[in-house]
Image (cartoon, grey):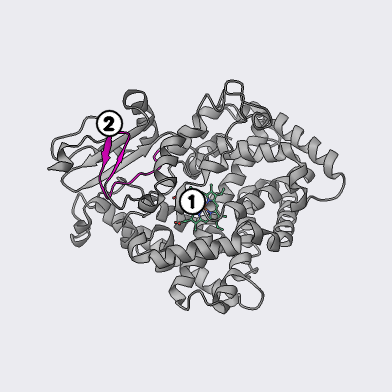
Amino acid sequence: YRRRSEKHPPGPRSIPLFGNTHQLNRPSRPEYLASLTPIHGDVLYFSNPVLGHSILALNTYEAAHDLLVQRASIYSDRPHSTMTLNIDVPTEWIITVSEQGDMAHVGALVEKLFHQHIGKNAIRDYSSAFEEESRMLVHRLHQKPDTFFDQICLAVTRIILGVTYDYRSVQSTSDPVTHLEQAVSYLVQSILPGRFLINVIPALKYLPSWLPFLGDKKLALAWGKKSTKLAHHISYSQATGTAAPSFAMSMLEGKDTDDENIMMWLCASMYAGGAETTSTTLKWFFFAMMRYPEAQHTAQAEIDQVIGDRLPNLNDRDRLPYVEALIKELLRCFIIAPTALPHRLMEDDHYKGYFIPKGAMPNSLRRIVSISRNEEMYPNSEEFRPERFLEPSTKSGEFPMDPHKYVFGFGRRVCPGIDFADASLFMNITTILSTTSIAPPSGTKGSTIALPLSQHSRYGGSSTFLKAEKHV
Ligand code: HEM
């Protein structure tokens, strides 16, 4: 009775009994949410009273910080996903979606081991690997510039598998290991709140998949076949990489856990969390350099002046403020995880006078994108302008917020690979810029990249990238 009489945050009109979570199940979800914000404000609520399923969209940095960071102790769970379990994703993949309750000890291990092995201090240990891989990438790019998509995937795969398993045998873009990102994309889609009916009504998994409304189950089975096939390659690489120091090796030798399943989860999470995210950001980098040649030239001039003829290394970072600003602008403009991963509220809560029930998913629906397009913080936010991070933003007199503060998520589930990703982006971008000019394919004009920034980058993500790629 209490729960019914309390007021939830505002949201669109709901259907009696069934609420309105079904309204989110549409391909144009970000656009739909954007259209609701001016009407209902920055915290939107969607619910399904019958199934006890509710989703909270947080569209400002303040709201995301207040709930996911300040109240992290109750907002750090992950929702259960029947779709994920049903697609038969091998258990190694599930760490990123594990609920805190029964997996609390794993959550603590994630924090400890990732921090220890890929945190700020540990990155220095891998500096030569980052440098070597970025140089090899440039070498391959110069030989086959038209295959840059594949070469980026190969470079990112090699560095992650190298650091994780000391597995360095992936030599070519035809090695199926470089395409594991497909499995990751299935996993990410399978946990999106409201995306699949089977996540809302788990019992549907017991019904035969030929029933007309069970498309989700059929899809899950089809995805499952593909993911399992791809994930076998991870086990293969794990079996071969044992001699030299690596993330896997130090876990095998350490005393933190002797549960091999957990070790596998943690290792696979490195790839699951780090591969597609980093490679998609690098692909957007190529796009940005073609579309904004002036930013490319300014960065190259800075590198030439500061570094001269030698190749860059991680120690050069502090002396390259424009390159640093360019990476921030890349992360801000091309949000590759626009809705991040969903969190789950572990007990009833109140925020700004509204009641939020236990189990609600304060998903980052649109929050990351909407924060990055805040006009007060980033005037002319649709423009790609690295300079904005080198000067105070005109209205507030302060420097604009560093996108690292929101692009990698919030609170206890914040991306543990943030320093790793940052080092990898810096090394690849600086090495490419110091040796290579990026231009649209010869025979075409720069203007053939017809899409204005706003149309293809607003909602980011790799699928959006693929749409943009066709136009390029
Ligand atoms: C540009 C690169 C990257 C971006 C934009 C990114 C972004 C994110 C985001 C938004 C989340 C969800 C945070 C939340 O729920 O609040 C996440 C989680 C995660 N990321 Fe990253 N990430 C990147 C690179 C990496 C790398 C390089 C690794 C590892 C080597 C990694 C490992 C992970 C893991 C394991 C999680 C799950 C953490 C958990 O559930 O507790 N990520 N990342």
Element on which disc 2 rests: loop
Q: Name the residue under label 1.
A: 414
- What span is in magenta? 349-365
Q: In which quarter of the image is residue 404?
A: top right
Q: In which quarter of the image is residue 350?
A: top left
Q: Quadrant of residue 20?
A: top left
Mark 2–mark 1 distance (CA, rounded to whole Å): 27 Å
Q: Residues within 10 Å of mark 1 (few under 14, many from 20)?
A: some
Please report the residue visible at 50 percent of the width from the left and 72 percent of the height from the top.
235
Type of the residue with mark 1: Val
Please report the residue visible at 51 percent of the width from the left and 52 percent of the height from the top.
415
Whether the magenta-drawn stretch holds residue 161 is answered as no
Please report the residue visible at 63 percent of the width from the left and 52 percent of the height from the top.
152
Q: Against 427, is 326 above or below?
A: above
Please report the residue visible at 65 percent of the width from the left and 73 percent of the height from the top.
245
Residue 213 coordinates in the image, percent (x, y): 20, 49
Residue 27 appears anywhere in the view = no
Q: Mark 2 points at which residue?
A: 10
| Main secondary structure found in the magenta portion | loop
Residue 39 coordinates in the image, percent (x, y): 32, 23
- Dot 2 beta carbon under 8 Å from ligand 1: no
- Dot 1 beta carbon under 8 Å from ligand 1: yes
